Image (cartoon, rainbow, N blue to C red):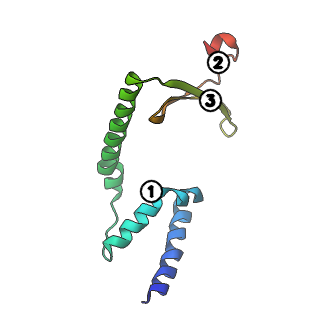
Amino acid sequence: MCIKELREKAFGDIPRWFYDAEITFHAATLESFAIMCELIGQFGLGLKPPSMHDLRVSFLKKEVEATEKAIGEHKKEWARKDCSILSDDWHDTVVQKDIVNFLVNSLKGSVFIRSIDVSKVIKDANSVV
C-alpha cells in the first residue's frame, strides 16, 4: 500500500475506535494521544497492543507510582514555599449531587486532592468553616 492509502485506512480506524470505546473527542487534543500515535508509527509493523490485564494491572500500577512520586515532589514544594488551598463547587445535574473539589496550588502547579459530596450539608457560613 502507498502512504496515502495507509493514512486513509488509519484515519478510518482511529475514529472508529473512539466511537466504539465511547471516548470523548476532546481526547484527540491531548498531547499524550499525539505522542502515542507517533510512538506506534516509530515502532512500525507488528506492534501488539497491551492486554486488558496489562492496562488494568501492570501499567496502571506503574502510572499510580509515577503519580504518587509527582505528588510527593509537589508536597516537598509546599513545605519549602507557600501554597494555597483552592476549592470550587458544582452541581451534577445528572445524579443531583452538590460536589466540592479541593486542590492545592503552588509555583510548581495545582494538584487535585479530593472531591466531597456536600448534597446533605446545609449551605451557610457555618458549614464552610
Mark nearer the N terminus (3 vs 1): 1
Which percent across, then down, holds residue 113? 48, 30
- Residue 4, visible in the rendered structure: yes
Q: Is residue 53 above or below residue 83?
A: below
- Residue at 38% across, 22% down: 79
Answer with left or right where residue 28 lies relative to residue 91.
left
Which percent across, then down, holds residue 11? 52, 75
Tell me the crowding category of disc 2: few under 14, some 14 to 19, or many 20 or more residues within 10 angstroms, Cα based. few
**What residue would you read off at disc 1?**
32
> Residue 121: which disc?
2
Q: Amino acid at mark 1?
A: Ser
Mark 1 and 2 residues: CB-CB less than 8 Å, in contact? no
| Secondary element at tag 3 | strand
Q: Is residue 82 above or below residue 55?
A: above
| Secondary element at tag 2 | loop
Depth check: give the residue in front, 108 or 25: 108
| Secondary element at tag 1 | helix
Position of the N terminus, as image quadrant, is: bottom left
**What residue would you read off at disc 3?**
88
Which percent across, then down, holds residue 100? 60, 28
Position of the C terminus, as image quadrant, is: top right
Q: Amino acid at mark 3?
A: Asp
